Amino acid sequence: MSEQTQAVPPPEPTQVLPRGRRVARRAGASVLILAALATGRWLEPELALAQVHGSVIQGIGYALYEDRDVDPNTGLVLAAGLEDYRIPGIADVPEIVTHVDDSGFEHVPGGGVGLGEIATIPVAAAVANAVRDAVGVRMTALPMRPDRVLTALSGGGR
């Protein structure tokens, strides 16, 4: 496995999140995502690492940006294309550190399981926990855009 997939002690975590994900804080801002996965042996470590990083980035988009506006009369999506649909760019992505526990899958043919979206699913919950930790309001709707966080802070919806 590459150096990036070796065990890395996490910085002081603010909270343990689903599936071992932790969000660390420095000077009040979240700057790192630690993706800890129990998947067994990676047959193609570089491809698997790219899958995990892509999944985390997709989760960030789901948590913070992606909002599918639908016409209530026709049911059609109002975004004409990706130029109208916000997804994370390189400046939106924090450092991602990956730790893999490759033990416990010896009974599985090949010694591992598929990655699929297992690294995507917990990201929105991790981001919601980081937002709550930072501002004291639990966000319950996605995406957690700044305008929605400000509304929640003023006592409006979440």
Image: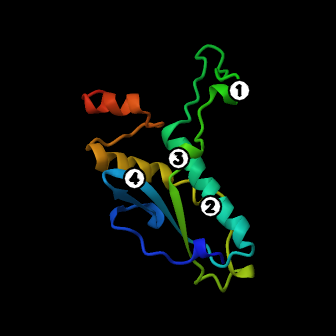
Q: Is residue 156 above or below residue 137?
A: above
- In primary-sequence order, the first of circles 3 and 2 is 2
Q: Quadrant of residue 75?
A: top right
Q: Quadrant of residue 78?
A: top right
Q: Quadrant of the C terminus?
A: top left
Decide if residue 158 is in sight here.
Answer: no
CA distance for labels 1 and 4: 30 Å
| Residue that mark 3 sits on | 60
Element on which disc 2 rests: helix
Q: Residue at x 70, y 22 (%)?
A: 80
Query: Residue type at mark 4?
Result: Ser
Residue 113 point in image, percent of width and height: 67, 72
Q: Nearer the viewer, mark 1 or mark 4?
A: 4
- In primary-sequence order, the first of circles 2 and 4 is 4
Q: Nearer the viewer, mark 2 or mark 4?
A: 4
Q: Residue at x 53, y 60 (%)?
A: 96
Element on which disc 1 rests: loop
CA distance for labels 1 and 2: 26 Å
Q: Nearer the viewer, mark 3 or mark 4?
A: 4
- In primary-sequence order, the first of circles 1 and 2 is 2
Query: Residue type at mark 1?
Result: Gly
| Residue that mark 1 sits on | 81
Element on which disc 3 rests: helix
Dot 2 and dot 4 residues touching (CB under 8 Å): no
Comparing 147 with 3, the one in front is 3
Q: Is residue 122 above or below residue 107?
A: above
